[in-house]
Image (cartoon, rainbow, N blue to C red):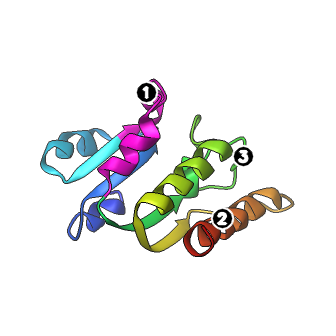
Amino acid sequence: ACAMRRSLDHAPVVHVGIRNISQSEVEALPSLKSTIFYDWNMRDDPQWMDRVVDALGPKVYLTIDADGIDPSLMPAVGTPEPGGLTWPEITRLLRKVFAARDVVAADLVELCPLPGMASPNFVCAKLVYKMLGYRFAP
C-alpha cells in the first residue's frame, strides 16, 4: 500500500523517522532493498544521521513526506502520528545529505492545508527553500 514500494522497482529506498508500519509491510521487508530508521529507536544512536547518510547511494532522489515531521510542527497532514522529526533534526539531516551526496531531485508531499492555519504551509515552503539553499548555495 505504501507509495514508496513502487520506488523499490527502480532503486533502494532509505526511510527515516518511520512511526507506523503495517503487518504486510513488516513481512515483506526481508525481501526488499530498503533500510528503515524507526523513530522510536534511531535517537538511541548519537550517530543516526551519519548512518542515514551512509545508507544512501551516491545519487539521491530525496522525498520528504510531511507526515514524518513532528505533528506539533506539522499538523496539516493526512495521517498525523505522534513523534516525528523536529525542525532542528530535519534541517541538520538535510544539510548532511546535501553535503555528502549528489541530490539530483527532491520533493515534499502530504501537506493537507487546514483552513485558518497557515503555519504548516510556511513550514513546508521553508523546508523547500532550505533544500534549494543546501543544494545550490552550500
Left/right of residue 22 with respect to residue 92 in the rendered view? left
The answer to which of marks 1 and 3 sits earlier in the sequence is 1
How far is disc 2 from disc 3 in space, using C-alphas? 16 Å
Check disc 3 and report its element: helix, strand or loop.
Answer: loop
Any part of residue 120 in sight: yes
Any part of residue 21 in sight: no
* Image x and y of residue 64, in percent: 51, 60
* Residue holding disc 2: 130
Q: Residues within 10 Å of mark 1 (few under 14, many from 20)?
A: few
Q: In which image quadrant can residue 114 be found?
A: bottom right
Instruction: Indicate whether residue 72 is drawn in magenta.
Output: no
What residue sits 30% from the left and 49% below the top?
Answer: 55
Report the predominant secondary structure element of the magenta stretch.
Answer: helix
How far is disc 2 from disc 1 in space, using C-alphas? 25 Å
* Image x and y of residue 89, in percent: 60, 43
What residue sits 69% from the left and 49% below the top?
Answer: 75
The single residue placed furthest to the left in the displayed view is 31
Above or below, 76 relative to 39: below
